[in-house]
Image: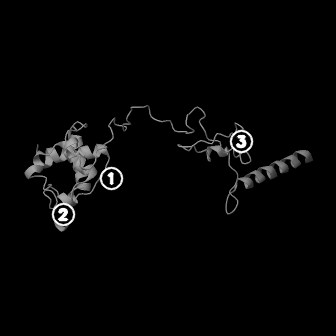
Amino acid sequence: MKIAKTLSILGIAAFGAMLAGCKAGGDNQGLEYAPQMYHSVAYEPLTQIVNEDQGQWLSTREDGKGEFFNSNVYNPNHMNMREPVEGTVPRNKSGMLPHRLKQFQLEDAALIENPIPSSDEVLKEGKTLFEQYCVACHGEKGQGDGKVGEIIGGVANLTGGAYINLPEGHIFHVITKGKGRMGAHGSQITPENRWKIVHYVKQVIQKQ
């Protein structure tokens, strides 16, 4: 009985010590289970650390290599990132090519066709985006009479003059790169959303 009681006391003490070791706070951050799951080895895209012993003094890696070894040894040019195949162009998740025309290349931009098919849902989203990004200057009906437009002046009236016949690619390019008083919105609006705005402008604002 005494042995069983002693073992019970020792077991309780051991369990209490284990719980105390799990406690974190202040300078004591506790213990981590499988620390590599929390502190993964970062792979630098443009460089490689090819010395497998680099950071050995710090390492807890299961593969026995140094903590700082982070290389894909099969990649050339001492880079972890693979270079794209020669002659290829990256596309976004929707399969669109990057828009790389310069601001002044309006004639080339005019040849680009809208890659997003029009639908009621697209026009609905285009309306929301137009209200979010365009109404302040162009006004709710695109007549250049938004609150900001009234102050700065010179805002395009999308419902009249030469603006009616602008190609969709031209409008997309101006949204992307800016023109005149209008700033570039390419960094604020995704390509897909820019094309949705174009649909809304042509079909609802201009009734084309």
Mark whose residue sits in front, 2 or 3: 3
CB-based contact (under 8 Å), mark 2 and mark 1: no
Side of 160 relative to 170 (left or right): left
Location of mark 2 (residue): 149
Which image quadrant: the C terminus?
top left
23 left or right, relative to 83:
right
The residues tagged by marks 1 and 3 sit, at their Cα atoms, a distance apart of 45 Å
> Circle 1: is it few (<14), some (14-19), or many (20+) Cα within 10 Å?
few
Q: Position of residue 129 (x, y in %)?
A: 26, 51
Nearest the viewer among 88 and 202 is 88
Label 2 with label 3: CB-CB less than 8 Å: no
Rendered location of residue 133, percent (x, y): 26, 55
- Could you tell me which secondary element the residue under label 1 belongs to? loop
- Disc 3 residue crowd, few under 14, some 14–19, many 20+, Cα 10 Å: some
Q: Mark 1 or 3 closer to N-term?
A: 3
Residue underneath mark 1: 188
| Label 2: which secondary element | helix
Is disc 2 surrounded by few (<14), some (14 to 19) or many (20+) residues within 10 Å? some
Q: Residue at x 80, y 50 (%)?
A: 14
Residue at 34% from the left image edge and 37% from the top image edge: 94
Pick whichever, 149 or 85, lies toward us: 85
Answer yes or no: is residue 53 visible.
yes
Gap in angstroms between the C-alphas marked 2 and 3:
63 Å
Question: What kind of colouring is applied to the model shown?
Answer: one colour
Q: Residue furthest right?
A: 2
Check residue 53 in the rendering and tell me which mark sits there, or answer none: 3
Q: Give the image location of residue 3, x and y in percent.
A: 91, 45
**Residue 175: horizontal and vertical position, in percent?**
25, 50
Count of numbered labels shown in the rendering: 3
State the residue at coordinates (70%, 59%). Answer: 28
Residue 197 in sight in this render: no
Q: The residue under label 2 is which amino acid type?
A: Gly
